[in-house]
């Protein structure tokens, strides 16, 4: 049974390790090894962005946990994509990760339902996210919720620049 709860600082090491493993499994084939290593070094680990964000009270992490194991998370933030400027008060789903063995089991839906309900409860008129253009599974998932492509974002993986799609859901 999947339980959903807010993350705490005590979840940091397990959350960081899980997110790092998912990112590498999903994206390591998309860039040269040196670029992947450069990105991972800034995003994860004791000095990485994920743990800094977890300590930031303005950033909200929601976990999916099964038998003490973190199997997914959503990260809700203030928007950082340019397109959000057209929607004052909007929020952004900055990450939604689920471990591979839980794909198709409702974990992502539980996290997305929480994200949308939380954004609505906070009075956000829209919810934004970015998704890698070559991640059709994730794009289809977001489209099922009504997200539409409204722009592009240059995602830096080391020295490589990839195209992410900016998607918006009007709330």
Image (spheres, rainbow, N blue to C red):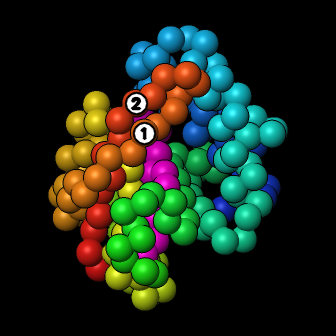
Quadrant of residue 145 in the image?
Answer: bottom left
Which residue is more in the foreground, 144 or 165? 165
> Helix, strand, or loop for circle 2?
strand
Q: CB under 8 Å between callouts 1 and 2?
A: yes
Mark 2 surroundings: few (<14), some (14-19) or many (≥20) residues within 10 A: some
The residue at the point 46 percent across, 81 percent down is 89
Q: Position of residue 109 (x, y in %)?
A: 33, 59
| Residue 100 lies in the magenta stretch | yes
Q: Position of residue 4 (x, y in %)?
A: 52, 65
> Helix, strand, or loop for circle 1?
strand
Relative height, residue 25 to residue 109 (above, below): above
**Number of the label disc, if any, that sits on residue 92:** none
Q: Is residue 102 visible?
A: no
Q: Which quadrant of the rendered structure holds the C terminus?
A: bottom left
Q: Residue lying farthest top? A: 33
Q: Position of residue 135 (x, y in %)?
A: 30, 34
The residue at the point 49 percent across, 55 percent down is 94
**Number of the label disc, if any, that sits on residue 154:** 1
Q: CA distance from mark 1 to mark 2?
A: 6 Å
Region in magenta: 90-102
């Amino acid at each position: 049974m999947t339980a959903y709860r807010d993350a705490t600082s005590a979840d940091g090491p397990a959350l960081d390790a899980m997110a790092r493993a998912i990112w590498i499994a999903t994206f390591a084939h998309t860039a040269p090894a040196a670029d992947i290593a450069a990105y991972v070094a800034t995003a994860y680990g004791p000095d990485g962005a994920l743990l800094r964000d977890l300590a930031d009270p303005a950033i909200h992490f929601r976990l999916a946990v099964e038998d003490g194991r973190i199997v997914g998370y959503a990260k809700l933030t203030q928007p950082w994509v340019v397109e959000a400027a057209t929607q004052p008060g909007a929020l952004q789903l900055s990450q939604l990760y689920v471990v591979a063995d839980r794909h198709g089991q409702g974990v992502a839906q539980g996290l997305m339902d929480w994200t949308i309900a939380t954004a609505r409860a906070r009075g956000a008129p829209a919810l934004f996210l970015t998704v890698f253009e070559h991640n059709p599974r994730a794009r289809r998932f977001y489209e099922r919720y009504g997200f539409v492509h409204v722009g592009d974002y240059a995602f830096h993986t080391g020295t490589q620049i990839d195209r992410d799609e900016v998607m918006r859901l009007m709330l």
